[in-house]
Amino acid sequence: MRARGDAVETAPGAPEVALDAAFWRNARLVMPDSQRKTSIHLRVDPDVLGWFREGGKGHLSRMNAVLKAYVDAQRRKRSA
């Protein structure tokens, strides 16, 4: 987002995280269990939503899986 000039908002004190080619090369998609989910309202860029929708039914589950993989990676990084 910074590269294309978009403002990037992060929580105060949040660590800088580089989502470079190495991150995506090592990323893996893990579909979540059918656990109970929390419903939220989330605003995303139109191109991001469009990309997930192009994958067909289940786009919200795939978005959740990407977010979960990111959280898991950050937890592993912190505990190392």
Image (cartoon, rainbow, N blue to C red):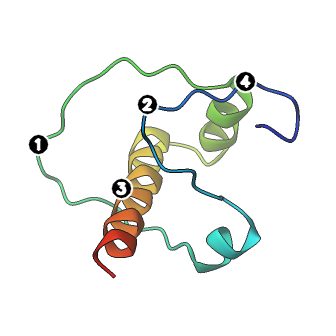
| Residue 8 horizontal/vertical position (percent) | 66, 29
Residue type beneath disc 1:
Arg
Measure the C-alpha gap from mark 4 to mark 2. Answer: 15 Å
> If you read the primary sequence from the N terminus, does the residue marked by circle 2 or circle 1 appear first?
2
Give the residue displayed 34% in from the left and 82% down from the top.
Answer: 80
**Foreground tag (3 vs 1):** 3
Mark 3 crowd level (few <14, some 14–19, many ≥20, 10 Å Cα):
some
Badge 2 density bin: few <14, some 14–19, many ≥20, Cα 10 Å: few
Query: What numbered label is drawn on residue 36?
Result: 1
In this figure, which residue is indicated by the disc labeled 2? 12
Read off the residue under disc 4. Answer: 7
Tag 3 secondary structure:
helix
**Mark 3: which amino acid?**
Lys
Name the foreground residue: 4 vs 50: 4
Which of discs 3 and 4 lies nearer the camera? The answer is: 4
Looking at the image, residue 62 sits to the left or right of residue 19; the answer is left
**Distance (Cα) linking label 3 and label 4:** 24 Å
Estimate how packed mark 4 is, as few (under 14), some (14 to 19) or many (20 or more) residues with alpha carbons within 10 Å.
few
Query: Which residue is found at the position 73% from the left and 64% from the top?
Result: 20
What element does badge 1 sit on?
Answer: loop
Work out how far the residue at label 2 is from the one at label 1, CA to CA, in angstroms.
29 Å
